[in-house]
Image: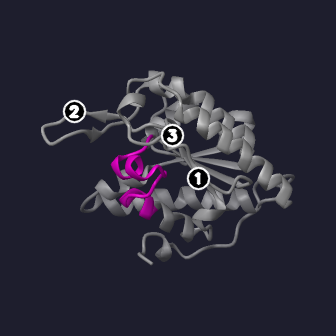
Amino acid sequence: MENGERERRAELLAQASTAAAACRKCPIGYERRNNVYGEGDPCARLMVVGEGPGETEDQLGRPFVGRAGQLLDRMLAAIELAREEVYICNTVKCRPTLAGPYGARNRAPDAQEMENCRPFLDQQIAIIAPQVILALGSPAAKSFLGRDFQITRMRGRWYAGPRDTPLMVTFHPAYVLRQTGGEIEGVKRMVWADLKAVRAKLDAPPEVPHVQAVEIRQASLFEAR
């Protein structure tokens, strides 16, 4: 893509980020440190959408920079994508929290918060015009596909996302990190299958959406680099 188009989209995203930072439709808009709008290539072929910023993201103003973000980077690397080549954001741009005995803790965004923030997400999708959207976790999936979506039964298949963009759903990296014992290998296999499907979709010509992509070693998926 020409540099002029990349610069145009980057400017549009910067303007939209400023508008999102000024938003106070939700109480969490008054509680957060930073508005975590999103980052990455404004001309990215793949957009990754999570549920909401966590504590580290709220502190730094960047999406997926904590432990889950480190795992996401390895997941992308396993299908030969650098973080800088994709666009990463969340369904909501402010950190949703619950009060606890040791301070605020993360929670999933509620339906009203996602509805209030949806225009910002739709604008990101319209500006970037990705070839594929990868939704991470149940809240992100439900924001696109409705509240009846059940990730354990319905992940791993293609859906029509906004603007008819092919949409794949897989488990959130934070969910993968919480798995223990024998469960973790099964979850890894499912995530790996979903990632390979994303890679194949990106590699396929538009006229032939089911062209098989080059196989990538599964062993690289969760290895630290």
Q: Name the residue under label 1.
A: 39
Image position of 175 (left or right of 38): left
Q: How crowded is mark 2: few (under 14 residues within 10 Å), some or many (20 or more)?
A: few
Looking at the image, can residue 130 be seen? no
The answer to whether the residue labelled 3 contacts the one labelled 2, judged by CB atoms less than 8 Å apart, is no
In the rendered structure, which disc, 3 or 1, sits on the residue that comes first in sequence? 1
Q: How crowded is mark 1: few (under 14 residues within 10 Å), some or many (20 or more)?
A: some
Image position of 72 (left or right of 157): left
Horizontal and vertical percent position of residue 159: 64, 39
The answer to whether the residue labelled 3 contacts the one labelled 1, judged by CB atoms less than 8 Å apart, is no
Instruction: Classify 60 as above or below 222.
Output: above
**Foreground of the two, 17 or 69:** 17
Distance in Å between CA atoms under marks 3 and 1: 28 Å
Horizontal and vertical percent position of residue 48: 58, 50
Q: Name the residue under label 2.
A: 99
In the rendered structure, which amino acid carries the disc numbered 1? Glu
The answer to whether the residue labelled 1 contacts the one labelled 2, judged by CB atoms less than 8 Å apart, is no
**Foreground of the two, 61 or 188:** 61
In the rendered structure, which amino acid carries the disc numbered 3? Met
Q: What stretch is highlighted in magenta?
A: 52-71
Distance in Å between CA atoms under marks 3 and 2: 32 Å
| Quarter of the rendering containing residue 178 | bottom left
In the rendered structure, which disc, 3 or 2, sits on the residue that comes first in sequence? 2
- At a point 62% along the width and 67% down the height, the residue shown is 81
